[in-house]
Image (cartoon, rainbow, N blue to C red):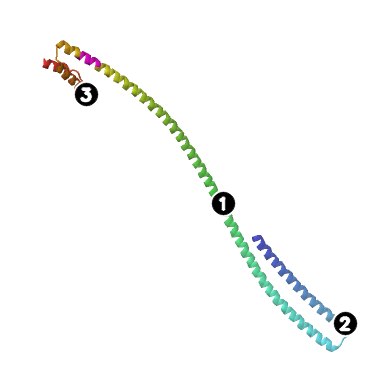
Amino acid sequence: MWFILFAIFTFKLMCIFIFVIYCVVTFLLVMYNAQTEELRRCIVPQDTNLDVEFPTESRESVDDKLEVLTEKLTEKERVLQKSQCEIKNAEKALTDLENKTSSCRDRYRSLMIELKKDIRETEDEVRTLQNQISNLSIRREALRSEVLKQQEDYQKMLSGFSKELESKKTLFCTLLRNILFCLKIDFNYFNLALSIYSFWYREIKTPSLLPFILKNKN
């Protein structure tokens, strides 16, 4: 855009300069013709009236033309100064625009650098989070396998303990029956002893009271 404005102002200046040159050349031609005519009158004898009237008319015509040309030249100089001021203002505006453009370009470059830096940091954070998620997934699978294994071990241990407890209970009942048979205790006392054993198994969990109870009963 500023190239077009500069070309327009340059064209105006050229037109003004050509017009001024044309006016000066015209003025010089008129003056030269007047001087040539005056020289011719001096050399060639002519009528006195013509000698008196023609130079006066020529001087008035030249003065009028000179005044007109002076006014036009003054006006053109004023237009030229105005055009020069406009050109300076346009150059100043173009300079400001170039400075702003350069500033915007630098700001855009800095913003792009910061944005690329933020994107790289975000990518690194996302990559780190993905690695952490993968590690946690692997750890969760390992913990799940370990928990399943512990549950299997616990079930096996509980099953073994239940079997052992049942065998001990059967053995104790057999031993108790033999003891009661040897001591010739009736069936009611056997039920009482069995109840005492059940109470011991559930609450006290010690067989040391059974001989004491049997001794006191006898």
User: Which of the two residues, 192 or 14, is positioned nearer the viewer here?
Assistant: 192
Of labels 1 and 2, the one closer to you: 1
Q: Position of residue 216 (x, y in %)?
A: 11, 17
**Residues in magenta, as a range:** 170-176
Identity, as a three-letter code, of the amino acid under mark 1: Asp
Q: Position of residue 214 (x, y in %)?
A: 14, 16
Identity, as a three-letter code, of the amino acid under mark 3: Arg
Most extreme residue toward the front, as rendered?
187
Tell me the crowding category of disc 1: few under 14, some 14 to 19, or many 20 or more residues within 10 angstroms, Cα based: few
Of labels 3 and 1, the one closer to you: 3
Residue 19 shows in the view: yes
Residue tagged 3 = 202
In screen coordinates, is 128 left or right of 10? Answer: left
Disc 1 versus disc 2: distance between alpha carbons? 80 Å
Looking at the rendering, in which quadrant would you find the C terminus? top left
Residue 212 shows in the view: no
In screen coordinates, is 27 left or right of 202? Answer: right
Residue tagged 1 = 106
Residue 50: image quadrant is: bottom right
Does 182 lie within the magenta span? no
Look at the numbered disc 3 and give the secondary structure of its residue: helix
Which disc, if any, is residue 43? 2
Q: Position of residue 180 (x, y in %)?
A: 17, 13
